[in-house]
Every structure is written in C-alpha cells, then in structure tokens.
Amino acid sequence: MDNTYNYYSAPSHDISIFTAYSIRRYKLKNHLQNLPSIDKLLQSGSLSSQIDKFGHKSVKDEARCQIDNLRESLLQKEDSALTWMSKPDFLEEFCQQISKAVRAQFSSTLIPVFNLTGTVVHTNLGRSSLPAEAVESMVTAATHATNLEYDLLSGKRGDRDSHLERAICEMTGAEAATVVNNNAAAVLLVLNTLAMNKEVIISRGELVEIGGAFRIPDVMESAHCTLREIGTTNRTHLKDYAAAINSDTGLLMKVHTSNYEIRGFTSSVPESDLSELSKERGIPFVSDLGSGSLVDLRQFDLPYEPTVKDTVDMGADLVTFSGDKLLGGPQSGIIVGKRELIERVKSNPLKRALRVDKITLAALLAVINIYKDPDRLEARLPMLADLARPAAAIEEVAAKVIATVSERLAGKALVTVQACKSQIGSGALPLDLLESRALCITPIAEKGKTDEALQRLSLAFRALPKPVIGRVSDGRLLFDLRCLRNVDDFLGQLDSLAD
C-alpha cells in the first residue's frame, strides 16, 4: 500500500493543518535568518551608552548571550518569541533588554533597604548607619594617598593606630588603644597574646554565644587557650576565681552577657573585686564588654549599659568592645587598657591579619570625634537618634503614611497603626524595649490561605526598588516606624506594589 500523503486528495481540515504547519515553519526559518548580528546590535547606537560605561567586551558578550537565548526560544517554537520578532520596534526593545542585562551584571547586590524590623542596630541589615562626617572622611581616605603608616615629622614608618589612639584614650581613660576588624577578633587577639597555652578563668554563666553561633569557648580554643570555667550558671563568687588560679593561669576574664540576662537568685563578681584579685596574684584581668558604650545612655532616657570608662576605672587591665554597635561607628573591634599589655597585643603577628584599613580608621575617628560634642551627640549620631526617638515623633510618622499604604493595599490587606516595642539589637540590652508605633498589615485572604497571602505581601514589599524589611507576627506584617526617616521615598515607591 502506498502510504505517501496525498495533499490534493486529503480532507479539507487536514489541508488546513498542513498549511498552518507550513506557514509556521516558514516563519520560524525566516525569523532564524533574521536574528540580528552582534555587529549590527553594537553599531545601532542604542547600546553606545552601555559600551561607554561598561566596556565593549561586556556588552558584546551579553548581546551574544541574548541572541543565543532568543534562538533557543525560536527553536522551541515559543509563540511569544515569534510574536516579539514580528514587532516593528523589535530591534530597539532587544537592545533595551541587552542594556538591562548588562546593568544588572554591574549592579551591586549590596543595596539600601528600609529597616522597619523594630531592631535598630540590626546585624543582618548592616548595624549602625554612619554620620555624614564619617562618610566624608571615608571618601577622602579612599580617594587619596594618605599617611596611614607614615610619620610626617620623622619621615619614617609610622603606626596606623596613632591616628585614633589619643581620641579613644581621651574618651575611655585608658593608657593605650588598638583597633582590629571586629570585637570577636579583639577577644581572639587578646587571648592569644596573653594566655596562649594557658588557662583562662571565666564564670560558667558568661560563656555566651553571639550571632552566627560564635561562642566564647570556641574563641578560646582558636586562641590556643584552655577554658577554666568556675561557679554555676546563675551564681559565681570571688572565692571561685581565687581557688581556680594556679601556675597555668594566663588571665581572669569577665564577659558582659549583653545578649541575655539571668534574673532571680543570681550573683556575679564586680570588676573592681576581680581587679584587686588579679593584682594580688600578678595576672591580667580582661573584660569583654561586647557592645560597649562610650556614654551613659540614661541621659537619653535609654536603659543603662556599662560604659568603657566605667570598666577601665574599675581596674580592668584590658577592655574589648565593638565599634559598630552602641558606639555607632563602622565594623571594628577596639582594645583599650594598660600600655604594656597593648604593646604586647600589637606585637602579636595576628594583629597584622586582623588590622583595619584606612577607610575604617577614618570613619571610626570621625565618629569618636562626634562624642567630643556631647551636647549635640543625639542629633549628629544616626544610631543614637533612632534609639532616642520619642514615641510621639514616631506617631507623627504613622499618621503620614497610613492613608497612602491603606490606599495602595485596598482590597488586599487591612492597615492599622498599633503600639509596639522596638529593641536596640546586636545583643545589647535584650530585655529593655523601647516604646514605638507600627503599621499592622493584615492580608485579606480566603480561609486557609492567610499564610500564603502574608508571604506574598511580605515579598512584594521586599521586591520594591528600595526593599522594605519588616517582621511577621501572628498572621500580620508589622512595620516598626522607629527608623523610618525618609517618608517621601517610602511612599513614593508604593505604586510598584500593584505589579
């Protein structure tokens, strides 16, 4: 039997299918042949600005990639690709797509966000915002050769710590100071310098774990020290320290439990008592403050946190603390104390691996200098301004934004304003909360689909040009307004929620 398909004797509906197939195949072949060449794209002028900005090679490579993707779509017989190539302005749109892809390649993944989580010093969101003076100092240091380690008077090599040691000592009352890249590094460096292959005596209740599962016992192990824990979780006495001291003891250590608090039947040993004991036995006493504040926060109606100067005055030989938490500066770890011990720390080879660069030094010095103007500290230091912001001022922000947010989410969510509590963050004063106000956004959803609607709503805000980060609680999306300063920017982008 002859199985050859007879086009002329086939039923009419078969002829229509065959004709449509032939036309589609012809169009596909024609579109494949008409794919723009790379040279044509690069010479069109539509990509000239991208070439000037990002370079010829980057644009050429992306153009080739986009052509390959379009060719694959055509071979897969995707109707959208066929339709797109049939448009009269296809070439211009194709160039725009290439431009967008090139810009995306060179765009930083580190972008500004609105921190409306209710945690002011938020580790995951970059902690403290820097004051304008610090940013200006960073730009100057970054764009010029500097005397980072050069003594202009002698014409010889200098010490990078000299640029801010005097200012730090003035604020803390310490004899000397040095700076490394964070407080964990500061603790590691001190332990490795003063107690390598020796015992470090510390209260069991102070074996804290900070962010990222970074634990004090692990730091000691990394520093090649032996942990000697004493006392119990809730009570440790001076006699416990005294009984534990032996010929292998490298130092006594006290760690401020800034990220948790034990209440009730508790007892801890004051720094002054530990200082006396350490002097009697001839071993150093080190205090790790963690967050570390340079001023008494009670003057700003905030909870009390031990200051670095208080700890130095109570006799600690060395004090370690962060530069980017309650101090409000860039990421850094600061070590202050006795000059002889600081010199030993600075001579440790690890110091070179943990040191900070000129940009961080410039920013940190600018922030510390702001503390020399105590009358305007709250106004000049963004971190402190957010912490000390009164509830009445936050209430005014809520009144400005609720109508617009409600309008943009009409039919999708109910928006109200409610009282809430902010927290300082980064382990500082975890039980002390600050009176604030929040937008409470409750999605309108079918029964059983509330969680899904809530996740979509949260994602929509995170997908805005400047992402808005809040927190989800009890089936609602909460935006704590304590840290919302630029209301116009926040409201101006909400039209994008419709997409």
Image (cartoon, rainbow, N blue to C red):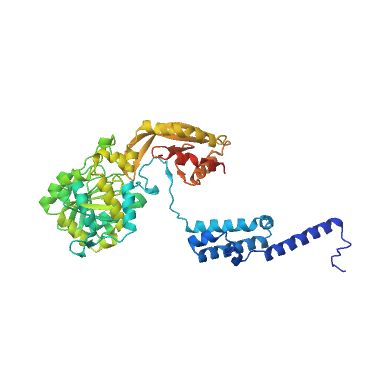
Residue 418 image offset from top left, x and y in percent = 43, 31
Q: Can residue 315 be spotted in the picture?
A: yes
Residue 420 image offset from top left, x and y in percent = 40, 34
Viewer-proximal residue among 374 and 442: 374
Residue at 50% x, 35% y: name it: 404
Q: Is residue 220 above or below residue 370?
A: below
Q: Can residue 238 be spotted in the picture?
A: no
In which image quadrant can residue 65 be found? bottom right
Work out which residue is located at the far left of the displayed protein and give it: 280
Q: How many marks?
A: 0
Residue 71 image offset from top left, x and y in percent = 64, 63
Judge left or right: residue 43 versus residue 218. right
Work out which residue is located at the far right of the displayed protein and give it: 9
Work out which residue is located at the far bottom of the displayed protein and give it: 2
In which image quadrant can residue 398 be found? top left
Viewer-proximal residue among 133 and 454: 133
Residue 482 image offset from top left, x and y in percent = 39, 37
Q: Is residue 211 above or below residue 25?
A: above
Judge left or right: residue 455 versus residue 36. left
Q: Which quarter of the figure is the N terminus placed in?
A: bottom right
Q: Which quarter of the figure is the C terminus placed in?
A: top right
Residue at 56% x, 38% y: name it: 448
